[in-house]
Amino acid sequence: MPRAALLVLLLLLGPARTDVISLEDRGAILQLSGDELTKRTFRFSGILKLTLLVEGGPDLEVEAPDIEVNPGEWVLVSQSKGETTTLEKGKRRWRKEVELDPIAPVKLTLPVIVLRHRHPPEREWITSRWEGVVIEVVGPAPEENPTVRGQLPIEPVPPGPGSHPFPTSEVIAVGMVLAALGALAWWCSRPGVRPALPADQRALGELQRLSAQVVIAAPGTTHLGVSVVVRRYVEERFGVQAPRQTTEELLQAARACDSLSPDALAELESLLGECDRVKFTGVMPAREDSEAVVTQACQFVRDTSVVPAS
């Protein structure tokens, strides 16, 4: 095919379809968007973006609290402060964005969102509320050849001795076990908050808690927890914006900062590659695999800490 014709074909086809779902309540709008979001079905490998919008006159006022998630269902990647911009004819628009990472390919409920708004100020507050919004998170389809985000393609995993459905009830149960770890992760991600302990000591403590729960944890949740802990440790220890980057982007930024030795970079690449393999291919790791990835993460933290942990 001639090169010009190929370019025209690509322009006509356009990017993969992404729907924007808008939910209106009493003058405020909640928009859901993300890669391959269609009819409230969302890809497990993507990041779900929530956008809150309120429009009004020049004296628009909006009150919106920080969004809190259930650690057993979502990982809070980021949330912005509410910002107001001026539109035509003196109108104003208030906007807040939140990014969520699903913890498992199952039906998940969005966090409860409540905001108040009014215009003009002398009027009573109007309360908008979204509760019980369910998103079905799906994993890779059998006919697809999934690849690890940010890594080279992984060879297909040989079929196991048997096929078992994803343990939905166990995922919900283990959410309570990981609540303390998730709450700590949310608290430390807030602007202006500093961890009480050095990055290496805090990371080792969280990894020890994950290790203690391997026996009762649903397959795959330990790998997800290790990825969250290691990425946050790299950000706090080396100043690399790890949580919002793909593995490839994270490794590129780590090489650019010149703070990690080649051996440490290789160890980090291997560790995150294993976590991504479990997350994006839907593989159900054995208990020994979960224990091994926690041990590998602990060794990486000790090798890269300022003062070796006792």
Image (tube, rainbow, N blue to C red):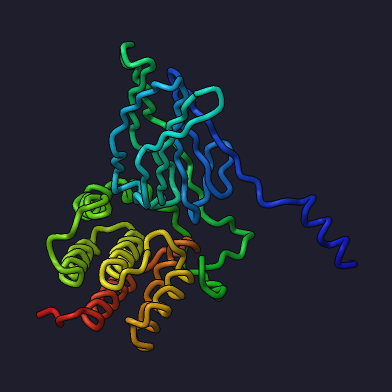
Residue closest to the eye, 14 or 226: 14
> Is 36 on the left-hand or right-hand side of 126?
right
- So how many labels did they put on this image? 0
The residue drawn where x is 44% and y is 63% is 245
Query: Is residue 243 visible to us here?
Result: yes
Task: Answer above or below: position of 271 versus 40.
Answer: below
The residue drawn where x is 31% and y is 12% is 122
The residue drawn where x is 78% and y is 57% is 10
Task: Answer above or below: position of 9 versus 297.
Answer: above
Residue closest to the eye, 199 or 86: 86
**Quadrant into which the C terminus falls:** bottom left
Classify residue 82 by image quadrant. top left
> Is 110 on the left-hand or right-hand side of 17?
left
Residue closest to the eye, 208 or 92: 92
In the rendered image, residue 134, in percent from the top left (x then y), is placed at: 43, 35
In the rendered image, residue 234, in percent from the top left (x then y), is placed at: 31, 70
> Is 28 on the left-hand or right-hand side of 231?
right
Query: Is residue 177 visible to us here?
Result: no
In the rendered image, residue 45, in percent from the top left (x then y), is placed at: 49, 56
Task: Answer above or below: position of 200 versus 34.
Answer: below
Farthest residue toward the right? 2
**Quadrant into which the N terminus falls:** bottom right
Farthest residue toward the top? 123
Task: Answer above or below: position of 50 versus 149.
Answer: above
Classify residue 241 by image quadrant. bottom left
In the rendered image, residue 276, in percent from the top left (x then y), is placed at: 44, 67
The residue drawn where x is 50% and y is 53% is 46
Farthest residue toward the left? 310
